[in-house]
Amino acid sequence: MAIDIEREQRARLAAFKRLEELEAVYGDVLPAAALRQGFFFEGEWVSLTAQQGIWRPRNPVRLELPISIRTAASDPYGDEMTDAGLSYAYRWRGLTEEQAQRHADNVGLREAMAAEVPLIYFHEVGSHEYQALWPAWIVGDDPAAMRFRVAVGDHDAGELATVLALPESGELRYATRVAKVRLHQRYFAHVVIRAYDTTCAVCRLKNHRELLDAAHIRADASLGRPDVTNGLALCKIHHAAFDANVVGIRPDCVVEVNRRVLDEVDGPMLRHGLQERHGESIFVPRKAMHHPDAALLEERYEQFRAAG
């Protein structure tokens, strides 16, 4: 039976619209319960994801092509980036090549690739929490490596209806790289701020997520796997002060304030916000495994000292 591509596209528009609504409510990190409730299509609620990594809805609404793929929290970026940043790698389902070649989920992704139909790429960032990259296309199939190549478009580029067409390779390469950066930043921020219990490490401002950033101790230009021990949860003021070497943090987790700033005379913001932090110990996560790496702090502290 021929696949009704127009219907598949309508289902994806409904799913994408629902993702926009969910992100307006929850931000970048979406709870699994909301994804399971899903999107409204043809009079029914259809789940956006399921326990298996490749999800093709069958009940109450049947779709002929998978609508989403999912990567576990232990591997938040998929296997790796391929083709100089053009695509992600995504493993086939099945233990052997012979089994995987026939697996219905893999067959479905090949059909989606042939039809150039987009889907959603979910990345688990913690227990029952996900980030969504969409629209995503299957752009290649590598039997030797038993993996698909997945590229990501830019749903912020315009109206929803414009995201259904597969972009040119140059546009796709750029959009996928941008998606990689955004995913890294969002994942890093989420895990660091959660480890610090939504609390600024310097001033202990608490429970104001909108005022907190995840600061890198060592700049991570390579966008490798994010590590909580290379991060500090800092409010906007102390993040800026840390980046500008107005505030430094010693390897023993004690705050130092630049001597010039300590000698300044100004209003209460300077006194309470910066000067009184000098010599205080920072707030650290409850789990020792999430404490800032002393070697990285020492490296960063030397930069602070060199800045005078």
Image (tube, helix red, strand yellow):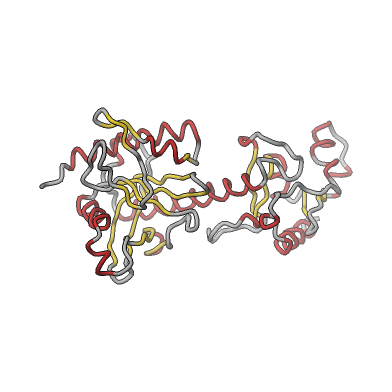
Q: Is residue 66 left or right of residue 268?
A: left
Q: Which residue is painted at 69% across and 50% down in the image?
A: 243
Q: Residue placed farthest to the top in the image?
A: 43
Q: Where is residue 284 in the image (x, y as percent from the top left)?
A: 73, 49
Q: Residue placed farthest to the bottom in the image?
A: 144
Q: Compared with residue 204, is residue 180 higher up or lower down, i.e. above or below? A: below
Q: Is residue 165 left or right of residue 3?
A: right
Of the 4 image quadrants, the one containing the C terminus is bottom right
Quadrant hosting residue 104: bottom left
Q: Where is residue 177 in the image (x, y as percent from the top left)?
A: 43, 54
Q: Which residue is painted at 36% across and 46% down in the image?
A: 50
Q: Position of residue 7 (x, y in %)?
A: 20, 38
Q: Which residue is painted at 53% across and 58% down in the image?
A: 223
Quadrant hosting residue 99: bottom left
Q: Which residue is more in the foreground, 292 or 235?
A: 292
Q: In this view, does 304 lie to the left or right of 263?
A: left
Q: Compared with residue 2, is residue 19 higher up or lower down, i.e. above or below? A: above
Q: How many marks?
A: 0
Q: Compared with residue 54, is residue 159 higher up or lower down, i.e. above or below? A: above
Q: Where is residue 176 in the image (x, y as percent from the top left)?
A: 40, 53
Q: Which residue is more in the foreground, 124 or 5?
A: 124
Q: Which residue is more in the foreground, 158 or 3?
A: 3
Q: Which residue is painted at 65% across and 34% down in the image?
A: 208
